C-alpha cells in the first residue's frame, strides 16, 4: 500500500465534519492483475432524496520540486482511478483533494482552468489549518 499524503488526516477530518461517513481508508480497486488504492472512500445520506452519494477521494499535496511534475502525476493517477471506478463502482464519484492554496494557484491559472473546463478532474478544495472543505469543483 502506498504512503499516505501529508494531508490525509486533514481531508478525512474535513469530510467527517461535512457529514460524510468514511467507508474505506484506503479504497481498494483491482483491475486485471493490478491493485490500486484511492486514499479515501466516503458516503453521505441525502435525506431529501433518501439515497446515498458515494465518493472516492485522492489527496495530493503538490509539495514536490516541480509543480508540473506533481500535476502530471496527479492527473494521470486520477484518470486511471476514474476509468477503473467507472467500471467497478459507477455510482462513486472521484475527486482530487487539494489545499486552498493549490486550488487558488494552480487551478486558477489557465492550465488548471482548462483541466476543469474540459472535465478532466473534479476538485475537493480544503483548508488544512481548519480542516474544512472550502468548495467542490466539478
Image (cartoon, helix red, strand yellow):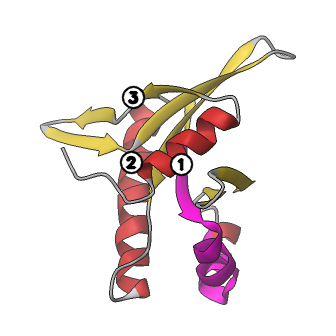
Give the extent of the magenta segment: 94-115
Observer-nearest of 45 and 133: 133
Q: Element under label 2?
A: helix
Which of the image's four quarters has the C terminus? Answer: bottom right
**Sequence-first disc among 1 and 2:** 1
Spot occupied by residue 61 in the image (x, y as percentages of width and height): 44, 68
Q: Quadrant of residue 29?
A: top left
- Label 1 to label 3: alpha-carbon separation: 24 Å
Q: Quadrant of residue 103?
A: bottom right
Which residue is pictured at 70% across the width and 36% down the height? 18
Relative placement, left or right, of 24 versus 54 is left
Pick out the residue farthest to the top. 50
Relative placement, left or right, of 118 versus 3 is right
Spot occupied by residue 53 in the image (x, y as percentages of width and height): 66, 26
Residue tagged by mark 1? Answer: 11
Which residue is pictured at 17% across the width and 36% down the height? 32
Is 22 in the magenta? no
Q: Is residue 70 above or below residue 41?
A: below
Q: Which mark is residue 51?
A: none
Neighbor class of circle 1 (other Cα within 10 Å; few <14, some 14-19, many 20+) is: many
Residue tagged by mark 2? Answer: 81
Q: Quadrant of residue 128?
A: bottom right
**Sequence-first disc among 3 and 2:** 2
Q: Which mark is residue 88?
A: 3
Neighbor class of circle 3 (other Cα within 10 Å; few <14, some 14-19, many 20+) is: few
Observer-nearest of 132 and 115: 132
Neighbor class of circle 2 (other Cα within 10 Å; few <14, some 14-19, many 20+) is: many
Q: Are marks 1 and 2 in contact (CB under 8 Å)?
A: no
Observer-nearest of 32 and 43: 43
Amino acid at each position: 500500500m502506498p504512503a499516505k499524503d501529508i494531508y490525509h488526516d486533514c481531508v478525512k477530518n474535513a469530510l467527517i465534519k461535512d457529514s460524510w461517513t468514511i467507508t474505506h481508508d484506503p479504497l481498494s480497486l483491482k483491475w486485471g492483475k493490478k491493485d490500486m488504492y484511492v486514499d479515501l472512500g466516503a458516503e453521505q445520506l441525502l435525506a431529501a432524496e433518501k439515497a446515498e452519494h458515494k465518493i472516492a477521494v485522492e489527496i495530493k499535496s503538490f509539495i514536490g520540486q516541480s509543480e508540473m511534475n506533481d500535476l502530471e502525476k496527479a492527473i494521470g493517477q486520477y484518470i486511471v482511478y476514474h476509468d477503473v471506478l467507472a467500471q467497478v463502482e459507477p455510482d462513486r464519484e472521484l475527486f482530487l483533494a487539494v489545499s486552498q492554496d493549490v486550488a487558488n494557484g494552480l487551478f486558477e491559472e489557465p492550465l488548471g482552468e482548462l483541466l476543469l473546463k474540459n472535465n478532466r478532474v473534479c476538485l475537493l478544495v480544503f483548508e488544512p489549518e481548519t480542516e474544512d472543505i472550502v468548495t467542490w469543483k466539478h
